[in-house]
Amino acid sequence: MKLPSSPLMLLAAGRLSVAASVFSLDSDDEIKKSASILAWDMLQYYHGNESGGTPGILPGPPPAGDYYWWEGGAMWDTLIQYWALTGDSTYNNIIMQAMQFQVGEGQDYMPRNVTASLGNDDQAFWGMAAMLAAENKFPDPPANRPGWLGLAQAVFNTQASPQRHDSTCGGGLRWQIPFTNNGYGYKNSIANGCFFNMAARLARYTGDTKYSDWAEKTWDWVEKTGFIDPKNYAIYDGANVAHQCKDINKVQYSYNNAIFAEGAAFMYNIASLSLY
């Protein structure tokens, strides 16, 4: 078969390809339809609600599957946003089951079965999903289960404790929580960025200045340590405690920028609305 070669034929072929796409941003209804297709497609990776499955988690971690525990939290966060923006409650029961099943024995998103790979950022992704549920008034859990705000606050409180914010490198959170985990000797931007993000959002939601104080303190520490470049706002990955966080790994990841940008937006919103 001879492929189309003239500009006109190539243009026609391109239009046919676009016309055949199931996605469209042409109207609110088309955007919602496209989002519903993507939401359904994402859930094809999830088997936790099936017989024998573990609610809340995606297949893994490697080598058992491709996904880590925190990625389940990120998925439920995405689906809560999907519900809030579209009004489609198709997946709300699955979200509820998953978010409540993984709260852990202390109801602070630190289940024992993920201890071997539990980082401050991992815990925070679930805490941020709970925070989003509170912010958007996602349906309340049953009366005998922890509420969304309480869960977000529990995550924040565990991370604000002196045991997590030790004096090495002048403060800040380590990457990992248990001292036996590989990476415990590393302080990084994503762990502190998630904490900053939660602090800023809890500050706006509750009006309590203890949260905004922590947000400001965390930003200042990250900038002082050199993880954020104040000239161009590049955000670097992290550094080793053994070197007093002077050996900065200047690899940049987009989710670091996103986490800090969202937290900064909440802090700006607080200031602009004169909430305090």
Image (cartoon, grey):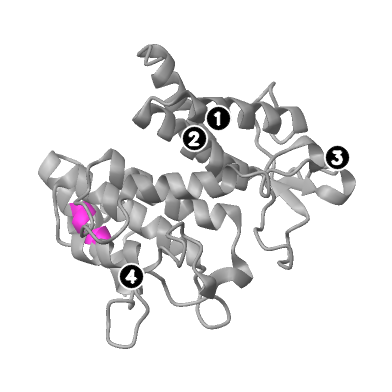
- Mark 1: amino acid: Ala
* Mark 4 lies on residue: 2
SS label for mark 1? helix
| Position above or below: 225 against 123 | above
Q: Tell me, for residue 104, which label it has, or none.
A: none
Q: Residue furthest front?
A: 144
* Mark 2 lies on residue: 199
* Mark 3 lies on residue: 246
Residue 254 lies, in percent from the top left, at 55, 44
Residue 139 lies, in percent from the top left, at 19, 51
Residue range highlighted in magenta:
34-39
Q: CA distance from mark 1 to mark 2?
A: 5 Å
Q: CA distance from mark 4 to mark 2?
A: 60 Å
| Position above or below: 233 against 259 | above
Mark 1 or mark 2, earlier in chain? 2
Q: Nearer the viewer, residue 19 or 165?
A: 165
Q: Nearer the viewer, residue 175 or 38?
A: 175
Label 1 close to label 2 by CB (< 8 Å): yes
Label 3 close to label 2 by CB (< 8 Å): no
Q: Nearer the viewer, mark 4 or mark 3?
A: 3
Q: Nearer the viewer, mark 3 or mark 2?
A: 2
The answer to which image quadrant residue 57 occupies is: bottom left
What crowding class fits label 4: few (fewer than 14 Cα within 10 Å), some (14-19), or many (20 or more)?
A: few
Q: CA distance from mark 4 to mark 3?
A: 60 Å
Label 4 close to label 2 by CB (< 8 Å): no
- Mark 2: amino acid: Ala
Q: Is residue 125 left or right of residue 92?
A: right
Q: Residue furthest bottom?
A: 52
Q: CA distance from mark 1 to mark 3?
A: 23 Å
> Does 87 appear in magenta?
no
Mark 4 or mark 2, earlier in chain? 4
* Mark 1 lies on residue: 215
